[in-house]
Image: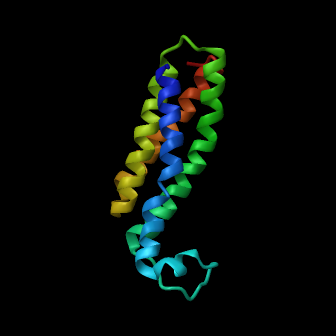
Amino acid sequence: MSYLEFYTTLTALWVAVSWLPYILDRIATRGLMGALANYDPNAIPQSNWAQRAMRAHKVNVQAFVAFAPLAIIAMIRIPDDSYPGTLAMTFFFGIVAHYLIYCSGVIVLRTLAFAVASLSTVALALRLLDII
């Protein structure tokens, strides 16, 4: 398995499980039945960190939607190029850092971590277009 395949898979796994903390908080604050209920604007609000986790997860999903197809194209078109694997690694660490920093409520570092992930996606697209 190449670094590109490994870190793209790890990113997909991260996106698939990073909803768990805020759902567990929802169960803790509203109870199991409250967590399973339909949306209610009058429901007990979740913890601040859990609300931030929900927003961070949404951003991670949106970022991965742009990154994943480029990674798949790179796996097919340039399988022997190591640069996409490095970009996949920086993308993964960028979105994990973004999530953790966002949950912690640190504003500037959150944006920088997201920028690392976004620039990794841009660089991968430019590599596929033979610009870099």
Q: Position of residue 80 (x, y in %)?
A: 54, 10
Choose between 124 and 24: the one closer to the eye. 24
Residue at 46% x, 59% y: name it: 20
Does residue 3 appear left or right of residue 125 in this picture? Answer: left
Q: Position of residue 32 (x, y in %)?
A: 49, 77
Mark count: 0
Choose between 106 and 67: the one closer to the eye. 67
Residue at 52% x, 33% y: name it: 8
Residue at 53% x, 26% y: name it: 5
Q: Position of residue 99 (x, y in %)?
A: 42, 53
What's the image's color scheme?
rainbow
Q: Position of residue 88 (x, y in %)?
A: 49, 30
Question: Can you name the residue that lies furthest to the bottom here?
Answer: 42
Q: Quadrant of residue 93?
A: top left
Does residue 33 appear left or right of residue 89 in this picture? Answer: right
Choose between 12 and 54: the one closer to the eye. 12
Does residue 29 appear left or right of residue 124 in this picture? Answer: left
Does residue 70 appear left or right of residue 90 in this picture? Answer: right
Question: Can you name the residue that lies furthest to the top here?
Answer: 80
- Quadrant that contains the C terminus: top right
Residue at 59% x, 37% y: name it: 67
The image shows residue 68, relative to residue 112, as above or below, that is above
Question: Can you name the residue that lies furthest to the front here?
Answer: 32
